Structure formats: C-alpha cells, structure tokens
Amino acid sequence: MAALVLEKVKELSLRDITVEESLGPHDVRIAIHTVGVCGSDVHYYQHGAIGPFVVNKPMILGHEASGTIIEVGEQVGALRVGDRVCMEPGIPNPNSQATRLGLYNLDPAVVFWATPPVHGILRPTVVHPANFTFKLPDNISFAEGAMVEPLAVGMHAANKARIKPGDVAVVVGAGPIGMVTALSALAGGCSQVILTDVEQPKLDLGATLGAITPVNISEQNLVEVVSGLTDGWGADIVFECSGNARAAAGVFEPLCPAGCVVYVGMPGAPVPYNVVAAQIKEARVEHVFRYAHVYPRALSLMGSGRLNVKPLITDKFTFEESIEAFDFASHMPPASVKAQIELPQ
C-alpha cells in the first residue's frame, strides 16, 4: 500500500510498503480519512528519536486519525461497516499489571502507532482492535475526529488536576496541546484559563475559545497578571504544556497555596526543580503520559457542543502533499496550530 515513510532522519518518501495485518475476531479494518501531524511525528522526522525510541528502519508516520470501518471481525458487536470512527493509537497488553490496574497508558509493552518500531497510519487502511475504536457522533467531522487523540492528552491532564468548579488555571504554552488543555480545563469546570505564549497570533486564537485570558510573556509578567486576576491568591492549577525547560522550572511562581501543577509538555533537557518553592505552598504535582479512559468523554463533550476543536484545525494538505505537510509543520507559522492530511476516498 502507498504510505508516508520515514526512511531516515530528515528523509521522507511516499511509496508502496508492505504491512502484514490480518483481521482478528475482535478487530475492525478502517479506511483512513484524516490524519493530524503531531509534534512527535515531526520530532522523529527531524531527529530520528524521542528518548529511548529510536527509528532504526523505515517507519510509517502518523497516529492522530479518523476513518470509516470497511470490515469487522466475527466477534465485533458494537461497530458496523460504514461507521465513522476515531482510534486510540496505543494498544496495551491486556494481561499486564498496569492494564489490570486501569493504568494501561503506563504499560511498558504498549504498542503505539508511529513509535519505533511500530508503523503509523499515514496509509490507506489499518486493522485495529474494536475496543480502541470509537464511533464519531453524527455532528462531528472526520477532521474533528482526528483531533480526539491530542484532545485526550488535555482531558487526561484535566482529570489529573482534579478540577473543582470555579478553579482558575494557567496553561503554559499555546501550541496544540496547550490549546486542548485549556479547552479541557474549561469543560472540566474552570471558571477562567490564563493562556501564555510568546506568539501573539496563537494567543489571539486562544482568546476566542472561551473564558481564556491571553498573556504574552515576552511583554507581560505572568505572576503579576495572575495576582491581579485572583486578588493576590494565585492560580489553583498550573498546566505546563510548553516543554520549555525554563517555563517548566517556574511553574510554582503563579500557583496558589495548596495548588496543583500538572506537567504535560516534555522538556528536551533536565529541568531544575525548586523543591522549596513547592514545599512552602504544599503544591501537589502531577505528571501526564499520554492518556487513559478519556476518548468516550471527549467525544461526548464534542458531540454536545461543550467542547469545540474546529478553530484549532488551521491547515490542511492532501495525501500527495504529505511531505510538504511535514516540512510545513517543522517550521509552523505563528498563526498555525494543527495541520492535517486528508487521504483519498
């Protein structure tokens, strides 16, 4: 089948590649419609590795996807041929201790699309377990369906924060993950989100998404803004979504006493951790790795209109333009948030 293949660092090709996938009794076969270009895909393209995950042989990219079921296994009950779906890309070992404890995103043996050596889904079809395939509400487009995967990260972060109705949150970083985290925080009960970045066009977009106050930290002092908006108390929650080491080191400054910090972004270098700053506020600190148990809730919020990801889809490419799409995403303009690739139908 034709696919977008990462041959080696900084070398992509659109070519035929053989992927052996038999349909099991609990599986579905899906014709891929839309695939989002994720930062991790771009990182593999530009650097060939993320931590211990190293691209040592040609690998198909892509893991944020939606499509249409074209075949079902004999024991699949809830899904039918023709259903429009999105797919959770990580398949855990059902017998692992992590999975049995409900922590399947932490299963060391998880098979995750476009994570070496596992092929991704920038290709015409894929076979996937029905249990990790979710029907799209009728009012949700394929493009929105392909946004559920990044949205799941924000939803998981909001769950980890244990939001209380009326909380004020800071979201550091207005990239795709920061944006979906801000939306998730509002949907989870936050009364206000303070969104930070250095790129004003992204902040301007964020300000249109709800009760979001944009703060350009190249021009404004975040702590002063938070203090002014909270009568000097501080934010109940700080979500660090930028992956910037300096930003990650300063998360306790705008936090209120007994507040919560959630590390979402992954810094490329070790981050200085100010233990005393955390101690004197008795801060609760959480960390996020992918997500678990959130796809149905994300789809329910989207289908009800409570959570709208459409404004985040800023750029679209055809499958034939896939290499161009990755070059574009490697140098994303300030006004762009999420690029997607549509496959021929």
Image (tube, grey):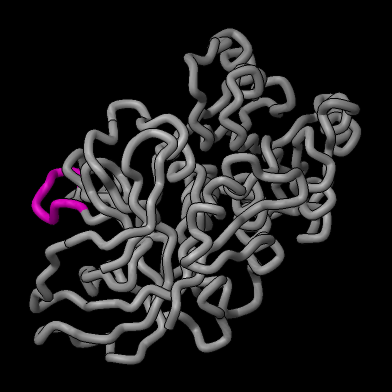
Residue for point 69% across, 43% down: 174
Displayed quadrant of residue 257: top right
> Magenta region: which residues?
92-98
Query: Of residues 317 and 30, which is closer to you in this image?
Result: 317
Q: Tell me, yes or no, if residue 298 can be seen here.
A: no
Q: Residue at x 36, y 87 (%)?
A: 83
Report the side of 177 relative to 7 (left or right).
right
- Image vertical order of residue 69 relative to residue 47, above or below: below
Location of residue 29 in the rendering, given as x and y in whole percent from the top left corner: 23, 77
Q: In screen coordinates, is 83 left or right of 262?
A: left
State which quarter of the image contains the C terminus: bottom left
> Would you say residue 328 is visible in this rendering?
yes
Comparing 58 with 176, the one in front is 58
In the picture, residue 214 is in which quadrant? top right
Please give the name of the residue rendered at 57% of the width and 14% of the height, measured from the top-left corner: 279
Residue appearing at x 52%, y 88% in the figure: 138
Total marks in image: 0
Up-down: is 295 above or below 201? below
Q: Is 226 part of what is drawn in magenta?
A: no
| Res. 305 image quadrant | bottom right
State which quarter of the image contains the N terminus: bottom left
Q: Main secondary structure of the magenta part?
A: loop
Residue 280 in percent (x, y) is at 63, 13
Q: Position of residue 10 (x, y in %)?
A: 44, 36
The front one of 111 and 215 is 111
**Percent coordinates x, y for residue 294 in the rendering:** 42, 61
